[in-house]
Image (tube, helix red, strand yellow):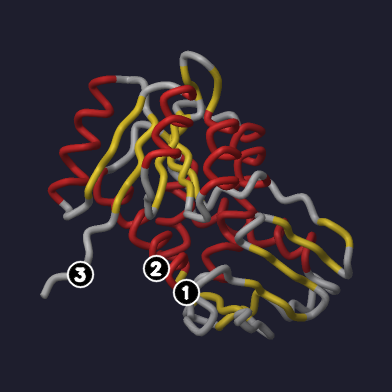
Amino acid sequence: MSREMKRIFLVEDDKAIAKNLTLLLQSEGFAVRRVSTQQEAAAMLAEGRFDLALVDISLPDGNGFAVCTQIKQVQDIPVIFLTASGDEASVVTGLNMGANDYVTKPFRPRELVARIRAALRGADRGPAVYAGNGLTVDTASGIVKKNGSEVFLSAMEYRLLLVFINNPRSIITRERLLDELWDAAGEFVNNNTLTVYIKRLREKIEEDPADPQIILTVRGTGYRLGGSHDAE
């Protein structure tokens, strides 16, 4: 017997994008319910249960942040923001509000589907918490703390950290990280840029960035996460 069809709640006011997204997601085996305004979203949330929400940040009668808050109050499901802007402040706001991920338009269909499946897998496992070397990361709330004090990461730094948090037992190659950051930024990220992001992240989360204990270098291969555990 096939697995239960996952239900996607799509909040998108652009009719063409909504139509294409609906067709894409249905072809991937998802059930899709779509609304175009914040008001419609509130009504739909009261009617049914969903497994994941795709929410456009810009809506005709409000914004996706308010919708995200409504969703989290009613249903504990992953939220992925769809944003047409490269406004990092907006992305950080969304992540701090508890959104699980964001995708910048225009996005590649296969990448969006991969992000959705990853978020659904994470939801099935429950919220992931990294705790080690004085750092805690709660992916449900998007809050990062170092020695009890909140650390404010850029959207790109948080995305980079999430790659490690979501793959605690894997060696992550530089090629994979480049793919992840390219998709998050919507622009080309090269090896030099990746080195800069790794350096900046280590400066914010490591006790001694010159002797990292959280993001470990695997010489000749890539990086891996050190000293972590997943919350039960």
Q: What secondary structure is found at the residue carrying circle 2?
A: helix
Would you say the residues marked 3 and 1 are in contact, meaning their CB atoms lie under 8 Å apart?
Answer: no
Q: Residue furthest top?
A: 60
Q: What secondary structure is found at the residue carrying circle 1?
A: helix
Q: Residue furthest front?
A: 47
Q: Is residue 174 above or below residue 87?
A: below
The residue pinned by badge 3 equals 3
Q: Quadrant of the N terminus?
A: bottom left
Q: Quadrant of residue 13?
A: top left
| Residue type beneath disc 3 | Arg
Nearest to N terminus: mark 3 or mark 1: 3
Q: Nearer the viewer, residue 121 or 201?
A: 121
| Residue type beneath disc 1 | Arg
Q: Left or right: where does residue 128 sit relative to residue 26?
A: right
The residue pinned by badge 1 equals 125
Q: Left or right: where does residue 30 sit relative to residue 230?
A: left
Q: CA distance from mark 3 to mark 1?
A: 16 Å
Q: Nearer the viewer, residue 128 or 115?
A: 128
Q: Nearer the viewer, residue 52 or 47?
A: 47
- Image x and y of residue 183, in percent: 41, 47
Nearest to N terminus: mark 2 or mark 3: 3
Residue sitting at x 79%, y 80%: 133
Q: Is residue 181 above or below residue 121?
A: above
| Residue type beneath disc 2 | Arg
Residue sitting at x 72%, y 57%: 143
The residue pinned by badge 2 equals 121
Q: What secondary structure is found at the residue carrying circle 3?
A: loop
Would you say the residues marked 1 and 2 are in contact, meaning their CB atoms lie under 8 Å apart?
Answer: yes
Q: Quadrant of residue 196?
A: bottom right
